[in-house]
Structure formats: structure tokens, C-alpha cells
Amino acid sequence: MGSSALPLILLLMSLIHAGLTQERSKPVVKVTPDQRVFIGETVTLTCDIQGGGNIQWIYWFKAGYNYNPYRTTTTAEFSFRADYVYYSGKYSCRGERSDSQRSDISAAVTLTVSDLPTSTLTVTPDSPVFTGETVKLTCVIESYSNWRQRNGLTYDPRYDWTPDWRYEWYKGTDRVMLQTSDRYTVNRDTLTIRGATEFDQGHYWCRGQRDKRPSSSQSSSAVSFTVMGLPTSNMTVTPQTVFTEETVNLTCVIESYSNWRYEWYKGTNNSVMLQTSDHYTVNRDTLTIRGATESDQDQYWCRGQRDERPSSSQESKQMYLSVHVSASSSSSSSLPVIAVVVLLSVFLLIFISLLLLWRYKKNKDQQRNVNQTSDPNQSAEFQMENFPLQSADCDHIYDAVTEVNKRHKDDPETFSEITYSEVTVQKKIPVDKDDTTAESNEVTYSEVRTKVKKCKRKGADAGVCDAVYAQPTRKKGP
């Protein structure tokens, strides 16, 4: 029995040895997108087991990782984001079926994670920036050749990114991307800010984008700059009160920096820059006006320019220069006016005198014609008599008292016409000096009203008729 059982035992042992010595499946690790990836890219590792049957578990191994397996998955794929160079290394896998049968471990695949090309931001001019200046920010992305040397890699034309970058610009921590506008100009790798203000100060950074791998550069380090106001300018005027013909000095004072060239302006709209001339003298920070006139009245202001930064100061406040007319200037300027007035007055007096003389002569001629002209129907000639009149208590002197007797042909009665040209009444002053009640009475008759009285003559010897003399208006002297 022992001899007959021996062949059976040998057969069973050969069958067992054949099963045990059968070759197990060998997995293969595949890497997507490439065994060379960049930081931030997503990497997918696939464990491909040919003929492995129903694989339930995949064990991933990484060289140098002390706790194996590195990762266990239920699928053949293992994806992760390569955010760090730490993900670089050798990866391998092994499968296990539900019956606990395991495959061989795959050959290791090397994954290289490279950092992205660096970006460097520069600012021109250096901080601080002054208001009104133009600021240029330039983004420089590391060249491919420098990147290869830094990472110890050989040349690969697939990654030569030199001409392909699109530049993005950001301001502040809220990652606001800047676009071309009225104040910002983006021209490839340069951002230009025109007319900088305090609003523009802050933190800036940049990066590059492209369509191929690597699709992005690293973000540059943030660069900040401050914006300062230009140095102020102050203008003073000496003297403060200016009269014509005086010399005026305007001085421009700039608070900081040196080597200023001073500019002087006159007027508000379309201001004119003043230069040294016969009337103006510009001596560094002082403008001198010689022999001020009323035409110098206007707004004046100044500012400074220089070759270094800041290249300009702020404009000073506008000051109004008021020029008053001096007394001597007023007298000299009024002489022509006075001369004209005097000449006109003399001419007017001469004209009035000639006019009065003409009127007087005309009236005299008319009076003479009246006295000398006779009526052909008049039966008697004029009889002219002068009558001195006297009073008992006053002396009366009559100058040219004329009586004209007229008789008309058809009127048997005669009438008298008496005209008084001047009547003066003088009252005698008493001898007694102590008599304070005595007064001097000098009366001049300034107006004489003539009354004509007709008288009838019954005969040639009837005598002179009674005459009613003019009643003068009496004005009492002092």
C-alpha cells in the first residue's frame, strides 16, 4: 500500500508546485499630464494591471515614504494637486483582488514637480512718487533658459515660453485686476499710471498667463509706493500797498528742496509767463516791477521747476496786485483836464459878455428910436423935462428921470410917460453919536413900475398936469 500511494503523492506535489510557480500580473504606472509637471497642476497616476481580474484594492507606494502604503484607493486612478515640490518622487502600485490575491509591485515612475517661472515687478520712478508724475510698473517673467538652469533640467522645446506671456496686473489685497482706462495703460509687460494721485498709492503685483504648459507664472511679490504732494510755493508782495511809479518786489518761497528755477505768471485765464524786460526783472526767486502803473493790476502767481525729482512745485495761490494812483500822479494827470476846464470857462465868460453887450446895445438903440421917432399926426413935439424931486426928511437923488409929453391928433388930451432908471434914498445920520436908535437908511430901488396918467388941458395956460410916479419896490440895505 505504501508503494502504490507514492505516485499519487508525487502527482499532487507537482500540481501544487505548478500553481505556486505560475507568474503573477505586473502593474504599470501611467502619469498624466506628464512625468514633469509644474506646481499647481493636477497630476493623475493610473495603475494598469493587465489580466488582474477583479481588482478590489490598489496600493500606492512612494520612495522614501516611511509608512507604506502611501495611499490606498478602490480605483485604478489616483489624482492630486501638486502644490509643492514635495510631491516629486518615485511612485509604484500593486493590486489586490477580493480573494486576497495580490499582484506584483509595478516598476517605479519618477514624477518631477517644478516651480513656476518667477515674476518680478519693478516701479519707476522710485518711491515716493510725487503727484502728477507718470509711474511705470514693469513685470519681468523668468526666461525659460534661466528656469531650466535653476531647476537643473535639459532643454525641451515644449516648454519654451519666452514669447507667449499675457500679463495681468493687480492692486491691493482684494486681487482687483487692472484694465486699460483713462489713467491706466497696459502695454504687454508694462503698466503706466499717468498723473499719479494719492489714490494710486498701495500694493501692486503681476503674473503671466499663456495657453501652453506652464499656463501661468508665479505671482510677483507685492510692490508698494507712496504718493506725496509737490512742495508748496508761497508768494509775498513788498510793499503791501502799492502806488503808481513805485517799485514792487514779488518773492516766491518754496518750502523744501533746492536748485529751483522760478517761473512768474500774470493773469488768470491764459496766464502769461513773465520774462525779464524793461518793466520786469526776474532775479531767481524775486520778480521786480519798476515804475508800477495801473496796467500792472492783476493776479500774479509763481511756481518752481528743477531737473531733479520733484521736477516741479505746486503753484502758489494767486494774489491780486492793486496799484493806487499817487497824489503827484493824480495832479499831473489832472493838469490837462484843468486846462481844458479853464479854457472852456474863459470862452464861456467871453461869450456871455459879448451877448450881454449886444443885448445892452440893442436895448439902448431901441430906447433911442422910441424917444426920437415922431408921429406925423402928432400936433406937438415931445417935451422932455427932468424933475429933481426932494423930500423934507430924506435926500432923494434921481438919475435920468424923463417925462415925455405926447399929444395925438385925435386925442386932445396929453399924457405923460415917466421912467425911473435908478432911485437912491439916503437918510442923514444924526450928529449925536450916543443916539443908538439912529440908523443909516440906504435904499436902492431894484425894480421900478411905471404908471402913466393922462391929464386933460382945458387951456394952453393950464400948467403941467399932475404925474403919478412909479412905485419902486424898496429893498432896505444893511
Image (spheres, helix red, strand yellow):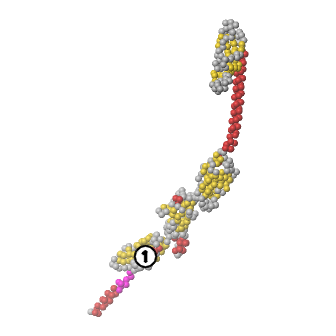
The number of callouts visible is: 1
Is residue 112 depicted above or below 258 in this figure? below
Using the rendered image of the protein, determine whether residue 421 is visible from the camera's viewpoint: no
Write the residue at 72% across / 18% down: 368
Q: Residues within 10 Å of mark 1 (few under 14, many from 20)?
A: many
256 in relation to 101, above or below: above
The answer to whether residue 90 is visible is yes
Residue 473 left/right relative to 198 = right
Q: Position of residue 348 (x, y in %)?
A: 69, 31
Judged from this view, the residue extending furthest toward the left is 1
Question: For mark 1, what is the residue?
Answer: 29
Q: Nearer the viewer, residue 417 or 73?
A: 417
Residue at the spot 71% in from the left edge and 16% down from the top edge: 386
* Quarter of the figure with the N terminus: bottom left
Give SS at disc 1.
strand
Res 225 → quadrant: bottom right
Q: Could you tell me which quadrant the C terminus lies in?
A: top right
- Residue 170: % across, % down: 50, 63
Q: Position of residue 308 (x, y in %)?
A: 62, 62
Which residue is rendered at x = 71% and y = 10% of the image? 380
Residue 42 is left or right of residue 130, and the answer is left
Q: Quadrant of residue 101?
A: bottom left
Q: Amino acid at mark 1?
A: Val
Query: Residue 205: x percent and y percent?
Result: 51, 65
Task: Examine the structure image and report whether residue 23 is included in the region drawn in magenta.
Answer: yes
The magenta stretch spans which residues? Answer: 17-29
Does residue 305 lie above or below 101 as drawn?
above
Magenta stretch: includes residue 36: no
